Image (cartoon, rainbow, N blue to C red):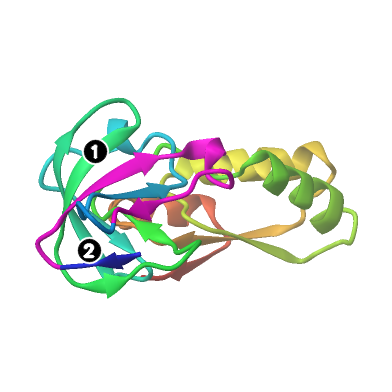
Amino acid sequence: IELEAGQDVIVYAAGEEYDKWQGYKDAVTGETKIGLSYGKLCQSVKPGNIILIADGAISIEVQKILGEKELLGKVINSHKLGQRKNCNLPGVKVRLPVLMENDINDVQNFAVKNHMDFIAASFVQSADDVRFIRKTLEAAGGRLIKIISKIESAVGLKNYDEILRESDGIMVAR
């Protein structure tokens, strides 16, 4: 989908439907609708927030929350949007668990069983996130595994000191 600076775009918070959902740009009207995998997008952002897609190659300013699953945005810079691009919400606390169900399975049934020395956890936002990871490891007998917390948001950076106290190492990205 070709996005052009200044155009309006509807952003759909697809959540778990993400794999089945398809964005579009109407050739006649120019109406454009794109989907993001973060299901709580419309509850997390407010007008004026910026949505960065594809490592910031695409920037969209939130104009209006249209409903529980849709918002109206304005494209800031022209760029072609491909499939499965990452998304970042600067300054927004993302309401996702630090470990999803498949991550818990990987930690407990791969890292612990294979006696890993370290695991790295992405998008750590708080000390509670690190404590949850440690509890997940300990429940499977992995109390000796060290935790490297990856800080990838302004919220994580704001909570850096508390995250550091609970972690065995830190990586900062983005």
Instruction: Find residue 91 and report its horizontal and vertical position in percent.
Output: 23, 51
Q: Is residue 140 left or right of residue 55?
A: right
Residue at x-position 19% and y-position 42%: 72
Please, what secondary structure does the residue beneath circle 1 have? strand
| The magenta segment | 5-26
Residue 151 x, y percent position in the rendering: 42, 61
Query: In front: 11, or 26?
Result: 26
Q: Is residue 40 left or right of residue 128?
A: left
- Residue drawn at (22%, 63%) of the image: 59
Examine the rendered structure and indicate whether residue 77 appears above or below residue 97: below
The residue identified by callout 1 is 71
Determine contact: label 2, label 1, CB under 8 Å: no
User: Can you say whether 97 is above or below 113 in the image?
Assistant: above
Q: Disc 2 designates what residue?
A: 59
Task: Name the residue type under label 1.
Answer: Leu
Can see residue 80?
Answer: yes
Of 89 and 20, the residue lying toward us: 20
| Image position, residue 75 (x, y; %) | 17, 60
Rate crowding at label 2 as few (under 14), some (14 to 19) or many (20 or more) other CA atoms within 10 Å: many
Left or right of 16 on screen, residue 79: left
Answer left or right for 127 relative to 6. right
